[in-house]
Image (cartoon, coloured by chain):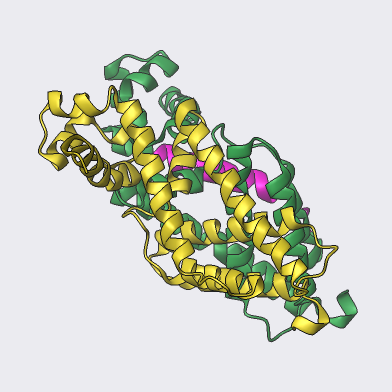
Chain colours: A green, B yellow
Amino acid sequence: MAKGLETRQSILERAAPLFNQRGFAGCSMGDVMEATGLEKGGLYRHFESKEELAIEVLRYSLERATRIRLEAVPEGTRAIEAISRYIEHFVVAPSAVPGGCPLMNAAIDSDDGNPALRAVVRKHLCSWKKRMRSLVERAQTEGDVKTDVDVEWLADTIIATLEGALMMSRVERTRQPLRHAQRSLEVVFASVKTERSR
Amino acid sequence: MAKGLETRQSILERAAPLFNQRGFAGCSMGDVMEATGLEKGGLYRHFESKEELAIEVLRYSLERATRIRLEAVPEGTRAIEAISRYIEHFVVAPSAVPGGCPLMNAAIDSDDGNPALRAVVRKHLCSWKKRMRSLVERAQTEGDVKTDVDVEWLADTIIATLEGALMMSRVERTRQPLRHAQRSLEVVFASVKTERSR
């Protein structure tokens, strides 16, 4: 990796927990300079503004979170099993970036504010939903989920239940809400499985 | 109401949407002065610091949200019906304070930061769970929910599913994730209802 790209990547890595923990307004370019050891000129050579940096940091954090979550799902697994492993991994794994789920943090941070950040959040949520829908559709093709089930509903349910439970879990500092979410998703999936798959 | 208390109340009302939309770091005492038309001295006469103001604003917003949500549940209703009305109201009603759910916003804002704000969030989440548990327990006493059902699990499931869906709903600017959450909760409740109650 060229030196410039290396520095850029290292800024993203170091700034990611700062923005994820403190939010856009709570994190200054000064904080990033301190965390990276760069001078103002060095930092602005790579990112024109705090907004540009925040957007690139968010993309970096979301990609990292997605990659880590998908690694938990081995290739060649039946979709119904992949969904179950995905949920289990969400429940037990620590945050990909310190500070909790970057999607939820940035969603709350940007829903009334920064439209550029909100656009990144929106796009990522859309692709997360799409990934969940594809898994459910594959489970239908494989004969494990009934074909008349609304895949949009199931995809939304997986994401909403896990994200809401993660918020509670971070407030309470226990995994119990996440375990409870897993149990609720099992109940929901039991209602859509084919006879054969139960 | 005495003049001093009136001013204090009016500061809380005007500052509530600011803190709820922008978060603790994103909202300054200057913003509050502008929104209330008060000078620095006038504002600090009522609240010693931004932290004290933020805490009182959060309490005000949480009480308001709770009151409005509970008003949707008429007295004398069977608990199973009260839960259903509570969920319906959460799905259709606009935020009690502009900027979305004050609990979720403050949770995300304070989970890595401000311990005093986090303590308010934690206490409120605890009492919200307690309220949901009491409703489920009453539904058990009234013979609508099976007596061997884990009430902690059900209480967590209601809150997590609704809060996660609200986050998605605010990103997408549609109510669909909330409607989907309502459907999922119906499926979960169908699995715990007594034969008689179905």
Q: Quadrant of the C terminus of chain A?
A: bottom right
Tell which of B82 and B23 is nearer to you. Answer: B82
Tell which of A186 and B147 is nearer to you. Answer: B147
Q: Residue at x 58, y 53 (%)?
A: A164
Whether residue A90 appears in this view of the structure is no
Q: Residue at x 36, y 52 (%)?
A: A111
Q: Position of residue B176 (x, y in %)?
A: 48, 72
Q: Quadrant of residue A197?
A: bottom right
Q: Position of residue B65 (x, y in %)?
A: 42, 55
Q: Is residue B11 left or right of residue B37?
A: right
Q: Main secondary structure of the magenta part?
A: helix
Residue A66 is covered by the magenta coloring: yes
Instruction: Name the outermost residue toward the bottom.
Output: A148
Q: Which residues are magenta?
A: A56-75
Position of B32 relative to A75 (above/below): above
Q: Is residue A123 left or right of residue A167?
A: left
Residue A86 is covered by the magenta coloring: no
Q: Quadrant of residue A41?
A: top left
Q: Is residue A140 left or right of residue B79?
A: right
Q: Residue at x 34, y 27 (%)?
A: B52
